[in-house]
Image: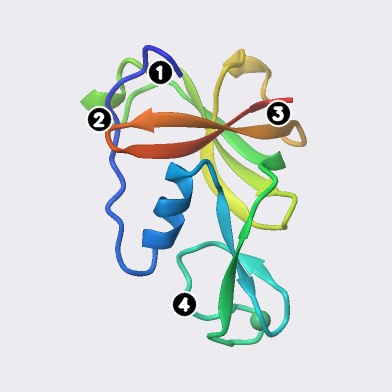
Amino acid sequence: MEGLIGGPIPIPNPISQPYWDGTKLGELRVRECNSCGAHFRFIRELCPQCWSDDLGWKVSTGHGKVVARVVVQRAPYAAMEARVPYVLALVELEEGVTMMSNIVDCDVATVKVGDAVTLTWEERGDFMLPQFRPV
Ligand SMILES: [Zn+2]
């Protein structure tokens, strides 16, 4: 991601702060339900499987696969103009959690559903943003 600048900056809240703290340690954290073991995104305060609020954190392996992708050709706003074309994707992590991210360090035209990807990081402002690159 060298040379890429700008773009949105996350705004942590009390629910998401531990997630963003993890990214600064190089950890991509997913929520883990202590009652049923389900994994899900950090945005939830209750387990979507059993509604428990007894939740912990698990550090993802960072390995996953592309389950949907689009090549963005036109920047949605000025700060993204230097990035186009880029791949916006849904990545399913090994833990079963699906997250939106970008596929980087690749020929954007070749990224397809089912491709194996692995975690990489983009430094943006004071944040480290999870991105993915082909394996
Ligand atoms: Zn649960």
Is the residue marked 3 within 8 Å of ligand 1, measured from its CB?
no
Residue occupying image coordinates x 53% and y 85%: 53
Is the residue marked 4 within 8 Å of ligand 1, measured from its CB?
no
Which label belongs to residue 77? 2
For the residue marked with disc 4, what is the amino acid? Glu
Residue occupying image coordinates x 72% and y 35%: 113
Q: Position of residue 62 (x, y in %)?
A: 66, 42
Label 4 vs label 2, nearer the camera: 4
Q: In this rendered view, identify the residue nearer to me: 95 or 111.
A: 95
Q: Position of residue 8 (x, y in %)?
A: 29, 38
From the image, tell me which residue sits under label 4: 45
In whole angstroms, how far apart are the C-alphas of marks 4 and 2?
A: 31 Å
Image side of residue 80 versus residue 108, left or right: left
Task: Pick the quarter of the image with the C terminus.
Answer: top right
Q: Position of residue 99 (x, y in %)?
A: 56, 50
In whole angstroms, how far apart are the C-alphas of marks 2 and 1?
A: 11 Å
In whole angstroms, how far apart are the C-alphas of marks 1 and 3?
A: 18 Å
In whole angstroms, how far apart are the C-alphas of marks 2 and 3?
A: 25 Å
Q: Secondary structure at mark 2?
A: loop
In whole angstroms, how far apart are the C-alphas of marks 4 and 3?
A: 33 Å
For the residue marked with disc 1, what is the amino acid? Val
- Closer to the N terminus: mark 1 or mark 4? 4
Residue occupying image coordinates x 72% and y 58%: 96
Q: Would you place residue 14 above or below residue 107 in this image?
A: below
- Closer to the N terminus: mark 4 or mark 3? 4
Q: Quadrant of residue 13 in the image?
A: bottom left
